[in-house]
Image (cartoon, rainbow, N blue to C red):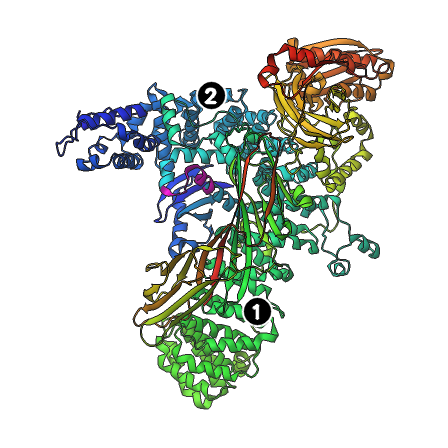
C-alpha cells in the first residue's frame, strides 16, 4: 500500500494499530523504494508500543500525508519502533500546531459535519488546540455551533469553549445556540444548569441581555448553591456587557448577599465590588453573617470578603488608635483604661467580631489570605494588636519568589511606621547571594528601615558584606542605604562616613561613584570639619569618570571652597582643560564652581572663570548656554546688570538645606496594603480608596438582623436548605459529642450578642422563634437486659449531618450497666445491604456505669423503613434497628412568606394532602401550634402576619424535596395542608400532626409510642457463630431471640 | 479579576493563551518581553508590571512564565497564588509542568483552565474536585476512551464542590489503605567567613500521602509540639483542635498533599550539620586564584550526611577551574559561572576536599568579593529540630490502615560566606 493513499483520518487506536501493522508488513517507502523487513512481527513489541500510542491518541491526528512520507531512512524505522512512534506523534503535533492551511480547516469542517461522534470530538480537540495557540478558527463557527446540543459531554464542553471565544465575532450565528442553553437551564442536574448559565452569560452578544437577565434572576433563586454561585459570576459578566442593567443587578446582588451558603459568599462579594462598591448599605445586614461564615468560605472568597470588610469597617467604626499615648500604660486591659479615661474608647462589638474571626486565617496555606488578614489588622486593629501578623508575614518569605516580592513590599511600608513589629525578625531579611535583584533591594530597604541605635552595628556589619557583592547595582543600593542609616542615626554618622570614604578607593567605579554621591549628601547635612574628606575626594577626582560622581565632587568643592582654598582653584583649572569633553551635568557644576570661586577667590580664578564662561556660551546644550549667560550677568559687574549683582554672593553661597535621605516606601501607605496599587505605587483602575475613620460612628443598629426567620441565631447551626453546610465548620470536630466542647467560646458569645440586639426590637417575632427546638425525644435502641449490660438509646439531634448532607444525624447514648467493662463497641453488619450509614468510631472501652454519646449518620432515603444494623462489642453482637419518625426526615427550610406561597402554588393537585383537625383547646395560640408542629417535624417556621394561618417549611434530608405545611385555624378546628412531591411522606406526616395537635394536651407524648407499636426484635448470638450461619440459620435466631417490649 | 493567561517559554514564544473575558491581543506581552530583555536573569523580571491599559502579573515556574493580564485592582498575591496553583495542578496531572507536556495535553489543559476560573474568579482549585471533573490522562484511559467513546470529562457536579470538605471526594475505595507522612525539615542558614552562624532557622513541612477508603478522620499528635512556633495548615486541619490540644485533627484529601508548614521556634539553637573550611583567594598578579574547600561533619545527630553538594557562583572573570577533588566530581558551568561539587556521602574518617587553581580572564581586574558557597545536603531518618510524631489515630472507619512516618533533614538556603 502506498503511503500516499492513506485514508485521511484515523480516529481510533485500533485503526492506527492496524494501519501500522500493515505498514510494517508491506509498506514501501517512496524514496528508497525498499521494504521494511517484511513479516516482522509487532507482537513482542506490542506492549511497549502502547505508550506511544497513548501519545498519538492524545495528540489530535493530522491528516497531512507528507507526515508519513518524510523520507526517513528505513533503517531507523526498523531500529526502534518506539522511536518511530515518538517521531510520528511529534510530527502530528507539529502539523497540528503549524500554521494551518485552508485545506486543513476544510478538513475539520468535514469532520465536524460527519455523523461520527469520535470524529467530531477529534476535530473539536484540534480546534481547541488552534484557539490555545491563538490561531484564528472563526470560520468554523457554523460547523461547530451545530454540535452545541451534543450528548457527548466532552464534545459539548469543547463547543462551549469555542462559543465563548468566538460568539462576539459571529453574533448572528451565536444566537442559534441560545435555545439550547435555555433548555439546559431547566435541567434537573445542577451541574448542567450551572454550566449552561456560565456559557450563556459568557457569550458577549448584547441582543441576549434580557435573556441573560432572566436567567440570572432565576438562577439566583436556584436550590443549588453551585448554580447560585454561577449566577453571582454571571452578574459581573452581564454588567460589563451592559452597564445599564445596574439597578436590576443590584437587586440580585442584594438577594444573593443574604444567601447563607459559603459557596456563594465569595462570588457575590466580587460582584458587589464590581457593580456597586459604594452601596455599603447592602452590607449592613449581612455583616455579621459574613464575619461568621468567613472561616468556611473557600480561600479565594476569603480574600475578597476580607478586603471588602476592611473598607466597610473603615466607614462604620471609630478609630481604635486614638489614645495611643495612653495605651502604653494599659497595654492589655482595655477595661481598666475605660474606667480611667473621661471619654473611653470601647470597640464596637462588631469591629471586634471581625478581628476575632479573621485571626485564625493567618494560619492559612494560601498566601493571599494571610496577606489580606495582615492588611486588615494593619488598617483596623488597635496598634498593640497588629503585631500578631508579623510571624505569618515572615513565614510567607519562604514561599515563591513572586510571593516574597509582594510581601517584602508590604513589609517595607509597614516597617517605616512600625519598626518594632519586624525588629525581632531582622535576620530573616538578611540578603542571600542567590536572591533576585529586586528581592535583594527590598530586603535592604527593610533592613534600613529597621535600623536603630541598638542594632545599627549589626546592620552595618551586614552591609559591609553586601557592598562587596558581585551584583553592582545591589552594592550601589547598599551604599545608599548606609547613607540613610548615617543620617537617621547620628551616633554612627562618623563611622559610616569613614566607611564610605574607604569605599572611595574601591576599584569598581559604580561603587565609588555611589559613595561620592552619598558622601556629598552626608557632608551637606553636617558641613563641619570635613575638609579632609573633601581633599581626599579632590584627589580621586581624576580617576572618577561617572558623571554623577564628578558633578557631586565639583558641587562640594564649590560649596565648601573656603574650606579648601588651595585645592578648589586647581580643580577648576583641570576642569577648564576638559570642559568640552564633559557631560552636561558636569559642565553645569563646573560653571557653578567657577562662579562660586570667582566670588570668593577672584584673584586666582578670574581668568579661568571667564574662559569657562566663554566655552559655555557656545556650548551645544541650551541649558548650559542659559546657565552661562545667567551666571555671567550675576557675577561680573557691568553697567547693564542692575541690583542683582550685589546679591550674587548671597544667592550663590546661601546655606542650603540638606537633602533628606528617605525610603522609597515613605508615601506608599496612602494605598491599602496588599493591593495592586500599593505594589505599583500608583492608583490602579478600579482602586477603592480606603476611607478615614469616621469621627462619630454611624448608627450601629443597622447591622442588627431582624429575626424574621424562625431559626436565625441558634438554628443557623442546624439550618435549612441543602446548601447549608455553612456553619458546620470544618474546624469543628466531626464527632458530635466533642463538637460542643471544641466549639470556641467566642463563637458562643457572638451568638448571644447577635441575639440580644434584635430582641429589643422585635419581641413578637422572637417569641415565635423560641420553640424551634422541639423537646428531644429519646428512643430505646437496646435494653440493658438484652444487651448483656450494654444499653443504647438514641435521639434525633435535628442537626445537619456532618458526614453527608443526605444523612440524618442520630445521636446514640451508650451506657454500660454491667459490672465489667465492655470493649470495642462498634457497628457491624447492616441491612438492607445498601444502607448508607456513617458509623461512629469504635469505642475501645466503656467502663461499668459509664456512658458515652456518639453520633452517626443514616441515609434513610426519605423513607420510614427501619435501618437495621448490628451493634457489636468485643464478645457479642446485637441486632438493633432505628425506625425514623417521618418528621425527622426533614430539615427546616427558611423562606419568606412570598416564596412559600410561590412554592405552594407549584405543588398543587396530586402533591397536596389536607385534613381538618379538631384542635385541642390549649393548642389554639400560635405559640402552642408551632410548638406542637415543631415537636413532630423538623421544619422551619415561615414568618407571617398576625393572622390565623401558620406556615412551616422543610426539605427532605435525602432528596431535598420541599415539604410545606400550612395550618389554618378556624374556631376549634383547623385545616391542615401539606404540599410535597413525596405523597407517602405527606400522608404520614399529616397523621402525626393531626394527633399531635388534637391530643397533645391530653397525652403529651402519645404519638411517640404509637409509632413504635411494633416490637423490636433483638437478636444476639454468641460470637462463635460464623458469618454464613448467622444470616440463614433459623435455629440460631430462635434460640437467642429476645422479644423486647417497647419501654414507656 | 484575572482577564487572560499566556504561557511563555524561555525563548519568548507564547505557546498557549486563554481568555476568560473578552480577547486581549498577545501584543500586550511585549511589555513583558521588554522587561525580560532588561533583566540579567529570568528570575529578575519584576512579577508585577504596569502597562498603559493593563497590569501584567507573572510567575516563573519550571522554565515557563505564567503571565496573567489584569485590568483592574486585584490583590497581586491573589493572582500569584492562583498561578502557582495552576502550575501545581499541571504538575499533579501530567507529572511535570513543562512546555512539551502542556503542548501534548493541550485539550486537557484547556478544559482545566476552563474549570478553574469563571469570569476570572477561581471556581475549582481543589485537586480532588478537579479530578472528578476532568480525569487525568493515562495511557490506559485514553485507549479505553477511544474504543468506547466515553470521555475524560465528568458530567455531574463533583461531590466535594458542595460539601463542607471540598478537598475530599466521596466514595473513595482502596484495597490497600495507607497513610504516609514525611516530615521534611530544611535548615536555612548563613555562616560567615569564620564559620560562625550569622543566621539559622529551621523550616519544616509535613507532606502526606493518604490513600484511605471512605471518610477517615485522622489525628496526628506530636511528642514535642512546643517546638513548633508558627504554623500554616491545609484547610482540612481543624484549627481549634490545634489551638486547644496541639494535635492535628483532619479528614484528609485523597492523595498527596501538604498537611502543614511550620517554623521551629528560634529559642532553640539550630544544629548545623556540617562545617566548612575554605579559602578562596584571587591574586593581584597573574590571572589566577586559589581555591581550597574542606567539609566535615558537625552536629549530625549520629546520622550520615548524604547527597552533599556545594554550589559556587563564581565571579564573572573566572574562566575555568582546574581542581582536584578527593571525593566526588566537580563541574564548572562556564556560561552561568557556576561551580558544582557533587560529593555524595560524607565520610567522617576521610573528609572531602576540593583544591586547585582558578584561572581568570586575562586583563580583568581581580574580583572584589569572594563567592559564597551554597551547600545542599540530606540527612535521612532525622528531623534536625527533634520533632517527633507520637501517634496517628484513625476514626470513622473500621479497617486498619498502614501508617508510616519518615523524617528527612535537608539544607534549605544554606550559605557560607567567604
SS type, badge 2: helix
Q: Neighbour class for label 2 at 10 Å: few (<14), some, many (≥20)? A: some
In the rendered structure, the residue with mark 1 lies on which chain?
A
Q: Which residue is mark 2?
A: A180
Q: Which residue is mark 1?
A: A458
Q: Find the magenta span and give its range.
A: B87-99
Measure how far apart labels 2 and 1 are at the Cα level: 70 Å
Query: Mark 2 or mark 1, which is nearer to you?
Result: 1
Outermost residue toward the bottom?
A603
Q: Nearer the viewer, residue A607 or B387?
A: B387
State yes or no: discs 2 and 1 in contact (Cβ < 8 Å). Answer: no
Tell me if residue A807 can be seen. Answer: no
Q: Nearer the viewer, residue B145 or B116?
A: B145
Quarter of image, res A701: top right
Q: Is residue B91 magenta?
A: yes
Quarter of image, res A991: top right
Residue A986: % across, % down: 69, 12
Q: Is residue A158 above or below residue A937?
A: below
Report the label total. 2
Residue A750: % across, % down: 74, 40
Residue A840: % across, % down: 66, 29
Main secondary structure of the magenta stretch: helix
Residue A47: % across, % down: 31, 30
Q: Nearer the viewer, residue B288 or B177?
A: B177
Outermost residue toward the left?
A33
Tag 1 or tag 2, which sits nearer the N-term?
Answer: 2
Amino acid at each position: 500500500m502506498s503511503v500516499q493513499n492513506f485514508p485521511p483520518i484515523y480516529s481510533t487506536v485500533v485503526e492506527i494499530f492496524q494501519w501500522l501493522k500493515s505498514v510494517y508488513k508491506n509498506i514501501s517507502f517512496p524514496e528508497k523504494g525498499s521494504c521494511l523487513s517484511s513479516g516482522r512481527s509487532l507482537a513482542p513489541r506490542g506492549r511497549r508500543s502502547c505508550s506511544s500510542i497513548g501519545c498519538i491518541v492524545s495528540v489530535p491526528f493530522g491528516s497531512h500525508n507528507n507526515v508519513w512520507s518524510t523520507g526517513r531512512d528505513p533503517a531507523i524505522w526498523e531500529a526502534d519502533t518506539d522511536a518511530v512512534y515518538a517521531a510520528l506523534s511529534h510530527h502530528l503535533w507539529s502539523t497540528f500546531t503549524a500554521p494551518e492551511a485552508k485545506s486543513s480547516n476544510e478538513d475539520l469542517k468535514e469532520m465536524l459535519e460527519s455523523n461520527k461522534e469520535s470524529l467530531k470530538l477529534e476535530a473539536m480537540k484540534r480546534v481547541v488546540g488552534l484557539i490555545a495557540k491563538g490561531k484564528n478558527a472563526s470560520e468554523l463557527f457554523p460547523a461547530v455551533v451545530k454540535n452545541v446540543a451534543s450528548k457527548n459531554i466532552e464534545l459539548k464542553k469543547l463547543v462551549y469553549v469555542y462559543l465563548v471565544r468566538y460568539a462576539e465575532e459571529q453574533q448572528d450565528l451565536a444566537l442559534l445556540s441560545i435555545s439550547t442553553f435555555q433548555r439546559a437551564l431547566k435541567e434537573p442536574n445542577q451541574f448542567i444548569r450551572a454550566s449552561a448559565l456560565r456559557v450563556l452569560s459568557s457569550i458577549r452578544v448584547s441582543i441576549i441581555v434580557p435573556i441573560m437577565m432572566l436567567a440570572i434572576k432565576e438562577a439566583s433563586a436556584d436550590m443549588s448553591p453551585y448554580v447560585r454561585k454561577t449566577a453571582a459570576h454571571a452578574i459581573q459578566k452581564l454588567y460589563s456587557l451592559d452597564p445599564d442593567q445596574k439597578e436590576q443587578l443590584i437587586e440580585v446582588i442584594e438577594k444573593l448577599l443574604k444567601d447563607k451558603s459559603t459557596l456563594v459568599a465569595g462570588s457575590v462579594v466580587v460582584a458587589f465590588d464590581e457593580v456597586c462598591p459604594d452601596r455599603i448599605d447592602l452590607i449592613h445586614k449581612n455583616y455579621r453573617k459574613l464575619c461568621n461564615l468567613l472561616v468556611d468560605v473557600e480561600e479565594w472568597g476569603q480574600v475578597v470578603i476580607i478586603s471588602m470588610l476592611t473598607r466597610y469597617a473603615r466607614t462604620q467604626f471609630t478609630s481604635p488608635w486614638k489614645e495611643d499615648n495612653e495605651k502604653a500604660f494599659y497595654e492589655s486591659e482595655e477595661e481598666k483604661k475605660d474606667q480611667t479615661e473621661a471619654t473611653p474608647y470601647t470597640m464596637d462589638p462588631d469591629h471586634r467580631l471581625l478581628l476575632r474571626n479573621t485571626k485564625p486565617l493567618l494560619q492559612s496555606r494560601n498566601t493571599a489570605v494571610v496577606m489580606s488578614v495582615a492588611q486588615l489588622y494593619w488598617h483596623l486593629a488597635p496598634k498593640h494588636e497588629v503585631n500578631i501578623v508579623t510571624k505569618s508575614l515572615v513565614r510567607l518569605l519562604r514561599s515563591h519568589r513572586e510571593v516574597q516580592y509582594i510581601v517584602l513590599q508590604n513589609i517595607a511600608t509597614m516597617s517605616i511606621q512600625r519598626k518594632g513589629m519586624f525588629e525581632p525578625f531582622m535576620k530573616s531579611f538578611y540578603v542571600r547571594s542567590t536572591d533576585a535583584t529586586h528581592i535583594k533591594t527590598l530586603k535592604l530597604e527593610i533592613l534600613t528601615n529597621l535600623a536603630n541605635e541598638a542594632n545599627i552595628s549589626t546592620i552595618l556589619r551586614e552591609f559591609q558584606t553586601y557592598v562587596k557583592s558581585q551584583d553592582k547595582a545591589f552594592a550601589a543600593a547598599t551604599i545608599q542605604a548606609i547613607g540613610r542609616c548615617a543620617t537617621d542615626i547620628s551616633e554612627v554618622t562618623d563611622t559610616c562616613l569613614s566607611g564610605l570614604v574607604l569605599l572611595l578607593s574601591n576599584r569598581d567605579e559604580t561603587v565609588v561613584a555611589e559613595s561620592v554621591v552619598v558622601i556629598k549628601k552626608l557632608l551637606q547635612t553636617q558641613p563641619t570639619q570635613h575638609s579632609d574628606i573633601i581633599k581626599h575626594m579632590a584627589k580621586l577626582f581624576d580617576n572618577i569618570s561617572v558623571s554623577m560622581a564628578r558633578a557631586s565632587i565639583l558641587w562640594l568643592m564649590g560649596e565648601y571652597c573656603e574650606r579648601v582654598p588651595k585645592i578648589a582653584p586647581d580643580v577648576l583649572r583641570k576642569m577648564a582643560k576638559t570642559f568640552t569633553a564633559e557631560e552636561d551635568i558636569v559642565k553645569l557644576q563646573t560653571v557653578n564652581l567657577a562662579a562660586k570661586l570667582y566670588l570668593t577667590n577672584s584673584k586666582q580664578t578670574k581668568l579661568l572663570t571667564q574662559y569657562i564662561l566663554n566655552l559655555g556660551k557656545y556650548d551645544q546644550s541650551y541649558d548650559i548656554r542659559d546657565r552661562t549667560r545667567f551666571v555671567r550677568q550675576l557675577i561680573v559687574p557691568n553697567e547693564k546688570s542692575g541690583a542683582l549683582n550685589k546679591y550674587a554672593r548671597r544667592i550663590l553661597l546661601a546655606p542650603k538645606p540638606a537633602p533628606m535621605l528617605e525610603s522609597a516606601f515613605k508615601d506608599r501607605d496612602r494605598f491599602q496594603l496588599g493591593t495592586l496599587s500599593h505594589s505599583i505605587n500608583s492608583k490602579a483602575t478600579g482602586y477603592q480608596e480606603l476611607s478615614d475613620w469616621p469621627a462619630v460612628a454611624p448608627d450601629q443598629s443597622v447591622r442588627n438582623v431582624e429575626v424574621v426567620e424562625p431559626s436565625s441565631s441558634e438554628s443557623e447551626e442546624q439550618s435549612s436548605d441543602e446548601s447549608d453546610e455553612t456553619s458546620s465548620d470544618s474546624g469543628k470536630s466531626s464527632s458530635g459529642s466533642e463538637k460542643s466542647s471544641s466549639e470556641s467560646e467566642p463563637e458562643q458569645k457572638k451568638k448571644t450578642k447577635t441575639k440580644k440586639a434584635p430582641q429589643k426590637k422585635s419581641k413578637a417575632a422572637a417569641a415565635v422563634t423560641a420553640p424551634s427546638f422541639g423537646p428531644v425525644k429519646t428512643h430505646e435502641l437496646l435494653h440493658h437486659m438484652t444487651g448483656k449490660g450494654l444499653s443504647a438509646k438514641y435521639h434525633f439531634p435535628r442537626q445537619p449531618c456532618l458526614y453527608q448532607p443526605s444523612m440524618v444525624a442520630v445521636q446514640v447514648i451508650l451506657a454500660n450497666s454491667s459490672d465489667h467493662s465492655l470493649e470495642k463497641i462498634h457497628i457491624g453488619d447492616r441491612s438492607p445491604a445498601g444502607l448508607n450509614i456513617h458509623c461512629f468510631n469504635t469505642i475501645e472501652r466503656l467502663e461499668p456505669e459509664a456512658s458515652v454519646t456518639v453520633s452517626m449518620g443514616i441515609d434513610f432515603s426519605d423513607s420510614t423503613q427501619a435501618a437495621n444494623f448490628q451493634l457489636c462489642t468485643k464478645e457479642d453482637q446485637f441486632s438493633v434497628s432505628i425506625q425514623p419518625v417521618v418528621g425527622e426526615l426533614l430539615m427546616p427550610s427558611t423562606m419568606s412568606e412570598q416564596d412559600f406561597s410561590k412554592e405552594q402554588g407549584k405543588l398543587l393537585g396530586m402533591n397536596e394532602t389536607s385534613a381538618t383537625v379538631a384542635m385541642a383547646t390549649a393548642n389554639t395560640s400560635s405559640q402552642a401550634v408551632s410548638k406542637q408542629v415543631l415537636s413532630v417535624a423538623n421544619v422551619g417556621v415561615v414568618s407571617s402576619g398576625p393572622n390565623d394561618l401558620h406556615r412551616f417549611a422543610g426539605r427532605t434530608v435525602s432528596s431535598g424535596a420541599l415539604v410545606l405545611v400550612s395550618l389554618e385555624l378556624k374556631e376549634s378546628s383547623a385545616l391542615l395542608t401539606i404540599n410535597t412531591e413525596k405523597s407517602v411522606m405527606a400522608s404520614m406526616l399529616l397523621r402525626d400532626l393531626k394527633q399531635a395537635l388534637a391530643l397533645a394536651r391530653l397525652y403529651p407524648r402519645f404519638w411517640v409510642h404509637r409509632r413504635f407499636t411494633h416490637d423490636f426484635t433483638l437478636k444476639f448470638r454468641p460470637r462463635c457463630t460464623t458469618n454464613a450461619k448467622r444470616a440463614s440459620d433459623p435455629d440460631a435466631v430462635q434460640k437467642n431471640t429476645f422479644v423486647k417490649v417497647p419501654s414507656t | 479579576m484575572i482577564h487572560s493567561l499566556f504561557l511563555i517559554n524561555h525563548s519568548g514564544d507564547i505557546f498557549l493563551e486563554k481568555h476568560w473575558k473578552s480577547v486581549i491581543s498577545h501584543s500586550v506581552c511585549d511589555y513583558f518581553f521588554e522587561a525580560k530583555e532588561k533583566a540579567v536573569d529570568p528570575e529578575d523580571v519584576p512579577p508585577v508590571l504596569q502597562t498603559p491599559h493593563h497590569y501584567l502579573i507573572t510567575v516563573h515556574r519550571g522554565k515557563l512564565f505564567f503571565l496573567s493580564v489584569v485590568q483592574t485592582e486585584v490583590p497581586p498575591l491573589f493572582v500569584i497564588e492562583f498561578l502557582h496553583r495552576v502550575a501545581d495542578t499541571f504538575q499533579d496531572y501530567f507529572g511535570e509542568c513543562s512546555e512539551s507536556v502542556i503542548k501534548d495535553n493541550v485539550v486537557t489543559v484547556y478544559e482545566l483552565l476552563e474549570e478553574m476560573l469563571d469570569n476570572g474568579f477561581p471556581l475549582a482549585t481543589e485537586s480532588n474536585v478537579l479530578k472528578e471533573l476532568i480525569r487525568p490522562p493515562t495511557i490506559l484511559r485514553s485507549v479505553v476512551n477511544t474504543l468506547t467513546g466515553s470521555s475524560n470529562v465528568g458530567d455531574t457536579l463533583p461531590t466535594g464542590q458542595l460539601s463542607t470538605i471540598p478537598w475530599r471526594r466521596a466514595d473513595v475505595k482502596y484495597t490497600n489503605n495507607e497513610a504516609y507522612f514525611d516530615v521534611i525539615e530544611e535548615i536555612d542558614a548563613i555562616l560567615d567567613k569564620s564559620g560562625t552562624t550569622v543566621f539559622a532557622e529551621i523550616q519544616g513541612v509535613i507532606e502526606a500521602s493518604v490513600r484511605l477508603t471512605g471518610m477517615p478522620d485522622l489525628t496526628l499528635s506530636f511528642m514535642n509540639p512546643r517546638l513548633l512556633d508558627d504554623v500554616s495548615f491545609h484547610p482540612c486541619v481543624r484549627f481549634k483542635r490545634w489551638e486547644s490540644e496541639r494535635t492535628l485533627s483532619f479528614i484528609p484529601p485523597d492523595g498527596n498533599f501538604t498537611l502543614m508548614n511550620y517554623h521551629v521556634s528560634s529559642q532553640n539553637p539550630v544544629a548545623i550539620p556540617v562545617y566548612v573550611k575554605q579559602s578562596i583567594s584571587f591574586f593581584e598578579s597573574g590571572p589566577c586564584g586559589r581555591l581550597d574547600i574542606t567539609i566535615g561533619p558537625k552536629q549530625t545527630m549520629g546520622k550520615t550526611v548524604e547527597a552533599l553538594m556545594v554550589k559556587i557562583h563564581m565571579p564573572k572573570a573566572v574562566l575555568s577551574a582546574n581542581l582536584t577533588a578527593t571525593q566526588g566530581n566537580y563541574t564548572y558551568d562556564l556560561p552561568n559561572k557556576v561551580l558544582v561539587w557533587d560529593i555524595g556521602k560524607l565520610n567522617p574518617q576521610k573528609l572531602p576536599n576540593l583544591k586547585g587553581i582558578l584561572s581568570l580572564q586575562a586583563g580583568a581586574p581581580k574580583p572584589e568579593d569572594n563567592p559564597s558557597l551554597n551547600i545542599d545536603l540530606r540527612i535521612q531518618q532525622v528531623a534536625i529540630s527533634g520533632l517527633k510524631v507520637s501517634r496517628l489515630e484513625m476514626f470513622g472507619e473500621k479497617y486498619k490502615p498502614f501508617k508510616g512516618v519518615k523524617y528527612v533533614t535537608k539544607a534549605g538556603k544554606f550559605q557560607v560566606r567567604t
